[in-house]
Image (spheres, rainbow, N blue to C red):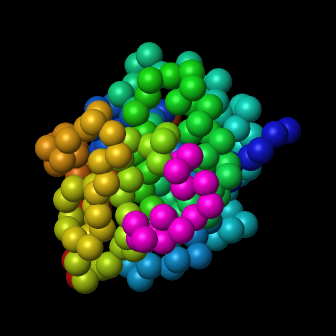
Amino acid sequence: MGLPLRIHAFLPSSSANGPGLRAVIWVQGCTLNCPGCFNPETHSLAGGQDVPISDLLPYLISLAPSLEGLTLSGGEPLQQFDAVLALLTQLRAVTSLPTLVSTGYTWEEVQKMPKVSDLIACVDVLLTGRYDVSLHLGRTLQGSANKRIHLLTHRYTLRDLEEVPDTEIFITSGGEVMASGIDPLRFS
């Protein structure tokens, strides 16, 4: 079956989760439990679905010609470090898709993780820091003012990130309404 990534949701096309049209993977599982988290349904380690990297990668490759990039969010992507690293390493080897990873870990915590240099080599933008509802922005990909943006390559600028729409609304084929992006209606 290969190394799995536990996924909460997948969106093949989004404009509110990074610059341009992007695929978005929300991983399942997070033990950080930031009060006021916009995605509490992604916290349970038992939820979601295990998807083998060997199944996910060909699908992402097939979408690549119509995408600007890939965004990983959560849950907490770095609590599935090996699977995330395997996916991003393989994706970087066969596509030119830029990647954005949003983590609740601080930059200092990320720096202490094993194989962090391998991860950084596969990521273009890393958003770090726990969500703080008292510092909620309601705009930008940061979510709260304490989160930090790390431009790890020259593919994007801060202006590129500032121009990302805050939220988008979808109606699924089943009639379900889905919101994606930062929650602009949340009040602290």
**Image coords of residue 34 (percent x, y):** 44, 79
Extreme right residue here? Answer: 1
- Camera-side residue: 139 or 102? 102
Q: Is 89 situated left or right of 109 in this image? A: right
Q: How many marks?
A: 0
Which quarter of the image is occupied by the N terminus?
A: top right
Q: Is 77 situated left or right of 151 in this image? A: right
**Image coords of residue 45 (percent x, y):** 68, 68
Q: Residue placed at 51% from the left, 59% from the top?
A: 74
In the image, is residue 161 above or below residue 130?
above
Residue 152 in magenta stretch? no
Q: Residue placed at 40% from the left, 25% from the top?
A: 67
**Image coords of residue 175 (percent x, y):** 46, 42
Q: Is 130 situated left or right of 119 in this image? A: left
- Camera-side residue: 172 or 161? 161
Residue 108 in magenta stretch? yes
Query: Which is the main secondary structure of the residues drawn in magenta?
Result: helix
Which quarter of the image is occupied by the C terminus?
A: bottom left
Q: Residue placed at 31% from the left, 54% from the top?
A: 150
Question: Can see residue 170?
Answer: no
Q: Is 105 situated left or right of 147 in this image? A: right
Q: Which residues are magenta?
A: 105-119
Q: Residue placed at 45% from the left, 62% from the top?
A: 103
Extreme top residue here? Answer: 65
In the image, is residue 15 above or below residue 135?
above
Question: Can see residue 156?
Answer: yes
**Image coords of residue 77 (percent x, y):** 55, 57
- Camera-side residue: 107 or 91? 107
